């Protein structure tokens, strides 16, 4: 979520209590540590941002197909994470259209609708309640994952340069925090990502020549580097479950929209992330999309990935992306727009157009998630520090606003499996504070079970 061409997030991190830590991180960079900084900071000696609890194994990463990879490598050479037998999400109906106006800030600084409550589940450099894990710097993209015991996990990226990685908090079926731990280390400025249908987390590096890592949110298997998904300034990804394709956004002023087409599918019908082709979108005057092969997706030559296909369409500041019911939704912060790509028709349209609105209801469109019922939740990068729902009919509904964090951004919105708890972060926290991120849980009637 940083501005294009700058490795450090666009507002100064070097303030207050985190100043020394952040400065120490940057002094460990190799010469020329701008946007082309090394993408394996562990090799440069950078320390971890979070402290694993006792018994947590090494959570660096391995290359796909390595003998100690967390993924299965079968006789056909497929490299994949076997799906977990977790409960399917319950059928839900949305109550978002009925949510009332936001009230005054509560004790945690959140403006909430009537009937909603909040708690803080993590603050940078502080222990997660009841655990030995220290919450990471610059919490960014996140997602939730059901567990076999009826609980869930919230995984959260760290966008800290040269530290990166992913932390996770595990909850019981009642919502009590039972554990917190690290699931990825030694990466660089991990921004957003993708919750896969087979219950893994794709964590994306938002740096030049950035990579994607497939992580186990349950903390049992090593993360795996997925170079086949391309080398560029990754923001987020989404899996098209019908076609087994992966769509990816790029946070550059002249970024592109990409599609990964696997060479094969796993036995469960999911995309094999170890081998395939990367394609880039070209949009014509009728808003129809064609896809062309990227010749050097790992950027092993001189030409940046986004510039390799002349005529491919520029998307200014690609941000969050999500697949729902045959549609890919994604946002572009540079134009303050939210887009929808209808996969079967291969057509593109804008569902939120900030520049054309007399009084924009969303400013700085960034991370997004889509509910089971088709509400598109958009997190603001600055703006009013809100999470706003774009409802299926096009109306806007503010769900929460973070007060007193004006120099921050809202990141990582995700619902628990029951649809009543919304998780998100204020990446840099209080405007008058040290730059420490806050991660929140808001509980209330966002959804209800189907009658």
Image (cartoon, rainbow, N blue to C red):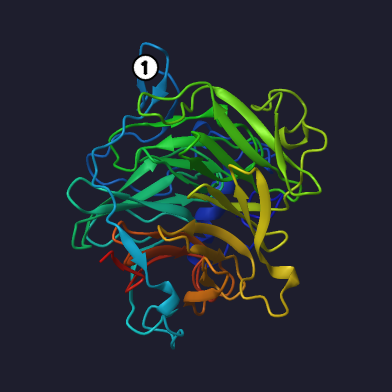
Secondary element at image label 1: loop
Quarter assignment of residue 265: top left
Q: Residues within 10 Å of mark 1 (few under 14, many from 20)?
A: few
The quadrant the N terminus occupies is bottom right
Kindly give the residue lying farthest to the top in the view shown.
75
Percent coordinates x, y for residue 121 in the rendering: 33, 64
Disc 1 marks which residue? 67
Q: Is residue 325 above or below residue 311?
A: below
Q: Quadrant of residue 270?
A: top left
- For this view, does 91 lie left or right of residue 248? left
Q: Residue at x 42, y 84 (%)?
A: 100
Q: Position of residue 213 (x, y in %)?
A: 48, 35
At a point 49% along the width and 24% down the height, the residue shown is 274
Query: Where is the C terminus found, in terms of image quarters?
Result: bottom left
Instruction: Choose top left, top right, bottom left or bottom right for residue 135.
Output: bottom left
- Determine whether 124 is above or below 58 in the image: below
Percent x, y of residue 144: 36, 52
The front one of 326 and 252 is 326
**Residue at image point 27% right, 37% down:** 84
Q: Position of residue 266 (x, y in %)?
A: 40, 25
Q: Is residue 34 left or right of residue 217?
A: right
Q: Is residue 411 above or below residue 226?
A: below
Q: Is residue 30 visible?
A: yes
Residue 121 seen in this snapshot: no
* Closest to the observer, 396 or 203: 396
């Amino acid at each position: 979520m940083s501005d294009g061409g700058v490795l450090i997030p666009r507002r100064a991190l070097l303030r207050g209590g985190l100043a020394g830590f952040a400065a120490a991180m940057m002094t460990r960079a190799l010469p020329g540590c701008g946007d082309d900084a090394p993408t394996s900071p562990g090799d440069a000696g950078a320390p971890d941002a979070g402290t694993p609890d006792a018994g947590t194994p090494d959570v660096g990463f391995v290359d796909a197909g390595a003998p100690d990879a967390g993924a299965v490598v079968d006789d056909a050479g497929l490299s994949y994470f076997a799906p977990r037998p977790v409960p399917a999400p319950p059928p839900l109906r949305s109550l978002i259209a009925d949510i009332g106006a936001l009230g005054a800030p509560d004790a945690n600084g959140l403006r909430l609708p009537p009937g909603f409550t909040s708690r803080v589940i993590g603050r940078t450099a502080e222990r997660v309640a009841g655990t030995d894990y220290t919450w990471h710097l610059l919490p960014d993209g996140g997602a939730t994952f059901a567990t076999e015991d009826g609980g869930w996990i919230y995984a959260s990226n760290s966008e800290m340069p040269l530290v990166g990685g992913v932390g996770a908090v595990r909850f019981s079926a009642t919502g009590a925090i039972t554990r917190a731990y690290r699931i990825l280390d030694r990466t660089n400025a991990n921004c957003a990502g993708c919750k896969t249908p087979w219950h893994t987390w794709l964590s994306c590096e938002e740096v030049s020549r950035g990579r994607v890592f497939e992580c186990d949110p349950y903390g049992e298997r090593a993360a795996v580097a997925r170079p086949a998904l391309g080398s560029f300034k990754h923001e987020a990804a989404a899996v098209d479950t019908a076609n087994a394709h992966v769509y990816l956004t790029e946070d550059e002023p002249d970024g592109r929209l990409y599609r990964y087409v696997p060479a094969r599918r796993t036995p469960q019908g999911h995309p094999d992330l170890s081998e395939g082709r990367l394609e880039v979108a070209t949009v014509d005057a009728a808003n129809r999309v064609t896809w062309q092969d990227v010749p050097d997706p790992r950027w092993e030559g001189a030409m940046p990935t986004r510039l390799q296909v002349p005529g491919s369409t520029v998307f200014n500041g690609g941000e969050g992306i999500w697949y729902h019911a045959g549609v890919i939704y994604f946002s572009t912060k540079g134009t303050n727009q939210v887009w929808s790509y209808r996969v079967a028709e291969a057509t593109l349209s804008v569902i939120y157009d900030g520049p054309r609105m007399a009084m924009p209801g969303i400013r700085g469109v960034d991370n997004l998630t889509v509910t089971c019922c088709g509400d598109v939740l958009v997190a603001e990068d600055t703006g009013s520090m809100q999470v706003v729902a774009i409802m299926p009919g096009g109306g806007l509904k503010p769900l929460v606003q973070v007060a007193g964090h004006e120099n921050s951004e809202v990141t990582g919105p995700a619902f628990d499996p029951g649809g009543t708890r919304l998780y998100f972060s204020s990446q840099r926290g209080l405007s008058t504070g040290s730059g420490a991120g806050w991660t929140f849980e808001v509980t209330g009637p966002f959804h209800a079970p189907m009658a």
